[in-house]
Image (tube, rainbow, N blue to C red):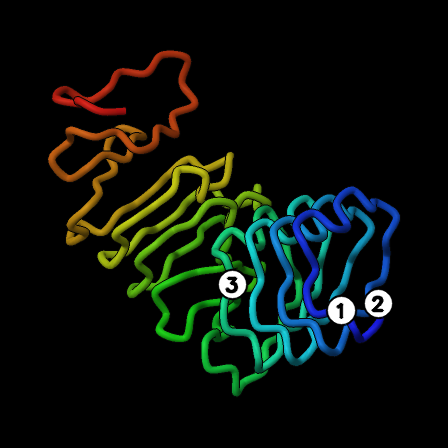
Amino acid sequence: MPNTVKEIGMSTFINCSSLTDVQLSNNLKTISFRAFGDCLSLKEITIPEGVQEMGGFVFQSCNLTKISFPKSLETIDQNCFWGLKLGNLQIKEDNEHFIYENGMLLSKDRTKIFTITEQSIKGNAFTIPNGIEKLAGGVLEAYAQITKVIIPESVKELEANFFPTMVETIEIDEKNAQYISINKQICSKDKKILYFCYSKDRSITLEEGIETL
């Protein structure tokens, strides 16, 4: 890619399924929505210094196992890494906006999870660190071995497709003010809203008092 390129637009390389290597422009600033979606042969990528923004679903359905981020990166859409199963993730220690910690890429204030690696999974369980406030879709999608997710007091917002398809148990801290897990259902604390049902049974009985699905 020539160094004149400053932005990779929406879906620029989508479905380039034989693409194995990308040398990005040294003057690149922005990587947009689904820029490398369905690049099935792309295994590793280094985001060069100077890139400031990465949009949603940039690497959706890719088989990336290694990715490196620069100091300059300021903004990442929380759905950027939808469905990725990364083995290796690196980010410059002096990046002011993000941190890689305990196998997770987090916002520097530790209120958002962007993606995880297998180091963050203990057996079949994934524990969300206390302090995380939003659980965005696709973060755990690729990790079929996760059957148990533990949610802390701090979570204020969740998307149902945050959870892996094989999840069997979701534990929510009783001090959480927003959510409760009961009978394989995540409901509002007052049990009037059903956010997510993860029962694998053939018959499902909703909680009494549910008004909104």
Between circles 1 and 2, the one closer to the viewer is 1
Res. 155 image quadrant: bottom left
| C-alpha separation, residue under disc 1 versus residue under disc 2 | 7 Å
Identify the residue shown where x is 82% and y is 64%.
22
Q: Does residue 150 lie above or below 213 as drawn?
A: below
**Label 3 vs label 1: CA separation?**
20 Å
In front of the other: label 3 or label 1? 1
What amino acid type should be assigned to the residue bearing mark 3? Ile
In the picture of the structure, the residue carrying the numbered disc 3 is 76
| Upstream in sequence: badge 3 or badge 2 | 2
User: Is 149 situated left or right of 30 in this image?
Assistant: left
Q: Classify 10 Å Cα crowding around label 1: few (below 14), some (14-19), many (20 and above).
A: some
Location of mark 1 (residue): 5
Residue 78 in the image: state x and y as whole percent: 47, 55
The quadrant where residue 194 appears: top left
Q: Earlier in the sequence, mark 3 or mark 1?
A: 1
Residue at 19%, 37% in the rendered image: 188
How many numbered marks, from 0 up? 3
Nearer to us in this view, 31 or 175: 31
Identify which amino acid the numbered label 2 is placed on. Met
Residue 45 locus on image (x, y percent): 74, 66
Whether label 1 touches label 2, CB < 8 Å: yes
Relative height, residue 203 to residue 54 (above, below): above
Tell me the crowding category of disc 3: few under 14, some 14 to 19, or many 20 or more residues within 10 angstroms, Cα based: some
In the drawing, what numbered circle is on residue 1? 2
